[in-house]
Image: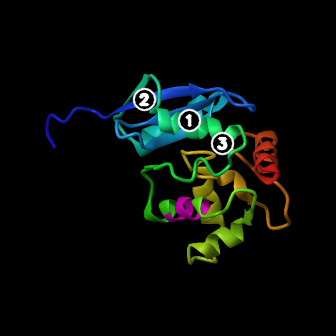
């Protein structure tokens, strides 16, 4: 489409018990990215892939979206379930991210279980790579994926945060 205006996304900053989160939404109130402030460069790189050409301006996310994020961190671990998210990515990546959202709060899955859930049981490594490219942390709960032996494995927000998120969800 010629002369189309670049999409404008809003970047909000929300305080949480494990550090400030960056919450990016579009005009419709759809979440486009969420990451921890100390990983802003990573979020910016992922967002450029998922929303190329978008302008990001500081502002406030829609009240219902911001309230859901705050409620989650205050103990309502199901508060994020109703939020709408939009990403770019391949069909495979989006299927992994959809499967992540199907993991109930307080539960975990292995990378093998995640690959099986999308009908590609041999694509364990690819599912792991897709998990790592998720631009919407916590809402698309990549922290709920663990190693085959039950250990906490890599998390872009850091293993201490991953441990906190899982403990937070289990306590609720």
State the quadrant of the N terminus: top left
Q: Nearer the viewer, mark 2 or mark 3?
A: 3
**Secondary structure type for disc 2:** strand
Looking at this rendering, what residue extends furthest in the left direction? Answer: 2
Q: Nearer the viewer, mark 2 or mark 1?
A: 1
Q: Going by the image, does 67 lie left or right of 160?
A: left
Reading the image, the residue beneath label 1 is 67
Q: Which range is magenta?
A: 95-100
Task: Residue 72: give its label.
Answer: 3
**Secondary structure type for disc 3:** helix
How far separated are the C-alphas under marks 1 and 3?
9 Å
Question: Where residue 122 sits: x, y (%)?
Answer: 63, 77
How far separated are the C-alphas under marks 2 and 3?
20 Å
Placement of 107 over or under 4, stated as above or below: below
**Secondary structure type for disc 1:** helix
Residue at image location 49% in from the left, 65% down from the top: 92
Placement of 33 over or under 169, stated as above or below: above
Q: Residues within 10 Å of mark 2 (few under 14, many from 20)?
A: many
Reading the image, the residue beneath label 2 is 10
Residue at image location 28% in from the left, 33% down from the top: 6
Q: Residues within 10 Å of mark 1 (few under 14, many from 20)?
A: some
């Amino acid at each position: 489409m010629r002369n189309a205006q670049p999409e404008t996304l809003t970047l909000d900053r929300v305080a949480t018990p494990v550090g400030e989160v960056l919450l990016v939404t579009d005009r419709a109130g759809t979440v486009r990215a969420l990451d921890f402030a100390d990983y802003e460069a990573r979020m910016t790189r992922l967002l450029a892939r998922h929303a190329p050409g978008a302008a990001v301006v500081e502002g406030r996310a829609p009240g219902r979206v911001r309230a859901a994020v705050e409620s989650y961190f205050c103990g309502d671990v199901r508060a994020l379930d109703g939020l709408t998210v939009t990403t770019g990515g391949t069909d495979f990546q989006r299927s992994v991210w959809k499967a992540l959202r199907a993991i109930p709060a307080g539960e975990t899955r292995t990378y093998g279980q995640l690959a099986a859930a999308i009908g590609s049981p041999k694509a364990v490594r690819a599912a792991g790579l897709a998990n790592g490219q998720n631009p919407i942390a916590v809402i698309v709960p990549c922290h709920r994926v663990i190693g085959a032996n039950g250990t906490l494995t890599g998390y872009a927000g850091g293993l201490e945060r991953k441990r906190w998120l899982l403990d937070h969800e289990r306590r609720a």
